Image (spheres, coloured by chain):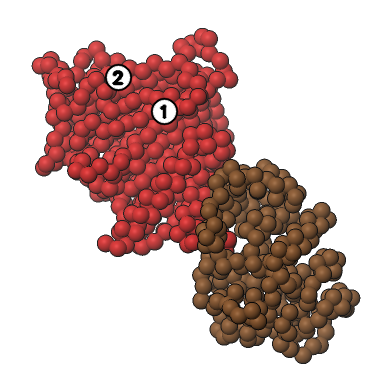
Amino acid sequence: MMFPGPGTMNAIGVDASAARRRLASRGWIGRDVESFRHLPPPAAEVWLGEEAGMSAAPGETPAPTGAGWTLHAIAEHPQGRVDARWLDTGDAGQRSELLAGLPLAEVGDAAPFAWAHRALCRHGLRLRIGEPSGAGADPAMTTWLQLRHQPRAAVEAPLLVIEVLAGTRCVLVETHEREAVEGQRAIVQNLHAHIRLGEGATLQHVRVATPRAGERIAHHLHVQLGRGARYDQALIASASAYHLQRSEIELQSERSAARVFGVLFAAGSALEQQVQVAHDAPRTSSSVESLVLASGNARAVVNAHTRIAPGADEAAVRQRLSGIPISGQPKLVLRPHLEIHHDAVQAAHGATWGALPQDALFYARQRGLDERHARALVIEGMAIALLERCLDGPALLQALQLDALLARTVAEQFAAATEARNG
Amino acid sequence: MTTAEPLLQVRDLRVDVGERNVLASVSLDVAAGALVVLMGANGSGKSTLGLTLAGHPRYHVVAGQARFGGQDLLAMSPEGRARAGLFVSFQAPPEIPGVKNNLFIRSALNAVREARGEAPLDAFDFLGDARAAAARLGLPEAMLSRPVNDGFSGGERKRNELLQLALLRPRLALLDEIDSGMDVDGVRATVELVQELRAQGTAFIVVSHYLRLIESLAPDAVLRLDQGRIAETGGLALASDIARTGFIRAAEPEKAQSL
C-alpha cells in the first residue's frame, strides 16, 4: 500500500480546505432547492466522510488500482486505440493532467456535490478513445470497452474523464455492480464523470449501477458534445439508502444529439434520476425516457429538465417518463420540464403512471406461466424495449448480454419487494 | 374423472362483465377428441365463454359449474387451467414488447411440461421444434426472435397462436375466430393442424363465422349461441342454415347434448 508523502498531503489538503470553505460559506443542498426537493440528499458530512463511524483517510485508498476503475475488452469486439491514465491527485503533475479542462467552479443546484467531490477526490481515470487527429482511424470501426468500478474505500469520490476523439465510434459499458458480501461496510460514493465528444464522435454509453441496500451513492455525469456528435446513455439502476443518477448534457454545437434513457428499479428504498439537457445550438436533438418500476415503500423520482436557448433553431426535444407501481405503496414523482426560449422548435413531453399491462399478463398466464413469472417477463420486456429504443435495436443488447442482466435485476427486485412485504 | 365424464362439462354457466350479464346460462359437454363449432352473432357471448373458461379476472362467474378433466375448472388459476391442458387462442392476441417470441413460448411450454412431469426443453431442442412448426404454419422464422406479436399483422398474430397450439399440444383448445385476418394458406394450415392434433386426442371448440372452414373441420356438433344461451344444437346443416339465413332466427334455448 502506498501512502501519500508530506507534499502530497499538502496538495490534497489545500484543495480539500478550499472545497470545505466553499461548502461552509455556501452551505449544503437545502430542502428548498428545486432539483432535490422530492428526495433531499444526505448531509455534506456523509459525502466528506465526517459522519460518525465513517472514515475517509487518504491511506485507505490503494493507489495502484486507480480508485477502483478497471478496463476490460468485450468478448471478441475490437478495442481500437484507448489511452488510459490512472492518476493520483496527490502528485502535482498527475493532478494537473487529471483535472485539465474540467470546470473549476461548479455552479447550479448540484454544485455542493462537486465541492465535496473535490475535497475528497484522491484518484481518477482519464481515458482518451480514438486516434489523435484521426490519423489511421477506420471510420467504420467501433471501439468496444468495459469499465468496471469497485469501491476501494468506505467513503470515496472517484473521478472519470473521458475524451472521445473526433470521428470515433465507441461502445462503453460502465458497471457499478455490487454483490452483497456479509460483514462488508455499506459505502458512500460521490462519483463525477466528465465526458467530451469531439466532432462527429459517437458514444453509446451503457451504465449499470446496482448498489447494495444500505449504500449511499451519487453519480454525476457532465457531457459535452461537439458538432454532429451523438451521445446515447442507457442506464440500469436500482435503489439503495440513497441513489442519485444525475446527467448534465450540453448540446453546444450544431447537429449534436443525445439520448438519456433509464430503467430504474426501486424496491423499498430511494432512487432519483436527474437529467438536465441544454440545447445551445441549432439543429440539436435530445430524448429523455425513463421507466420506473417501484415497489414497497420506495421513493423514486425522475426529474427531467430541458432548456432550449434563444437561437437554437430546429431543436427537437422529447421527454417521456413512465412510472409503474409493482406492489406496496411506493412514492413516485415524475417531473418532465421544458424551458423553451425559441420559436422554431419541436418539443414533446409527458409523464404517465400506470399498472402493468393486464392483457399481456393474462395472456402469459393463460399459456402456463405463473403470476410471478409472467410479471417478471413482462417487466423485463418493458425494460428491454426501452433500452432497445435507446440503442437502435436489439443487437447491442444481445452482444452485451444485457437481457440476462435485466432478468437477474428483476429477480432481485422481486426478492427485495417480497422481503419488504414480509418484514 | 370417470370414463363417462366428458373432458369439458359446463353447466348453467352465468357470467357477468362488470355490471352487465353476458352469459345467461350456458351448458355444454365436449368429449376428448371431439370438435364443436360455436356460432353466434356479435355480442352473443362466444368470446366471453372462452375467456371465462380461461380464467380472465374481468369475467365473473355468478352461477354454474365447469369441470375439466374431472377437476373444478373454476377453482383453478389461469395458469393451472393451462397446465391442465386448456388452451384458449385470443381473437386479438396482445403484444408483449421486449419479450422475444421464442423465449416466451419456451417458458410457457416448459411450465406446461413441468406440470405434466416432463423434462424441460433446452433452447436448442425447442428452436428446432419451433422452426419446423413455424415453417408448416407459414410463419416466417424471423418472427420467433421478434417480440411477442409486436408489429405482427393480424394474420401473423393468428399464426403465432397456432404455433403455440402446435407446440403446447393441449387437451382442449378453444380457437376464437382463428381464421379472421388469415389468408387462404393460413386457413388451410389451420385445418391441417386441427386435424392432426385431433387425431392425437385434442378436443376443440372452434368459434367461427365461415362455413368453408367449418365444413373443412368436419365438426361433431354445431352450437348457436344467442343472448348468452345455447339456442340451437345441430350438425353441419345448422351451420349451413346460419350461413344462408343469418343469425336472426327464432329458437328456443335448449341444453346441449353430450358430444
Mark 2 lies on a secondary structure that is strand
Frontmost residue, A274 versus B146:
B146
Chain depicted in brown: B
Q: In this view, which residue lies farthest toward the bottom? A: B252
Q: Tell me if residue A321 can be seen.
A: no
Q: In this view, which residue lies farthest toward the right? A: B244
Residue A195 circle label:
none
Q: Left or right of B220: which side holds B98?
A: left
- Rendered location of residue B236, percent (x, y): 85, 75
Instruction: Determine the residue positioned at 56% across, 35% down.
Output: A395
Amino acid at circle 1:
Gln
Instruction: Determine the residue positioned at 65% across, 60% down.
Output: B169
Q: In this view, which residue lies farthest toward the top? A: A135
Chain depicted in red: A
Is disc 1 on the same chain as disc 2? yes
Frontmost residue, A103 versus B137:
B137
Q: Nearer the viewer, mark 2 or mark 1?
A: 1
Residue A86 circle label:
2
Q: In this view, which residue lies farthest toward the front? A: B3
Q: Chain of mark 1?
A: A
Looking at the image, is A366 positioned above or below residue A153?
below
Q: Residue at label 1?
A: A146
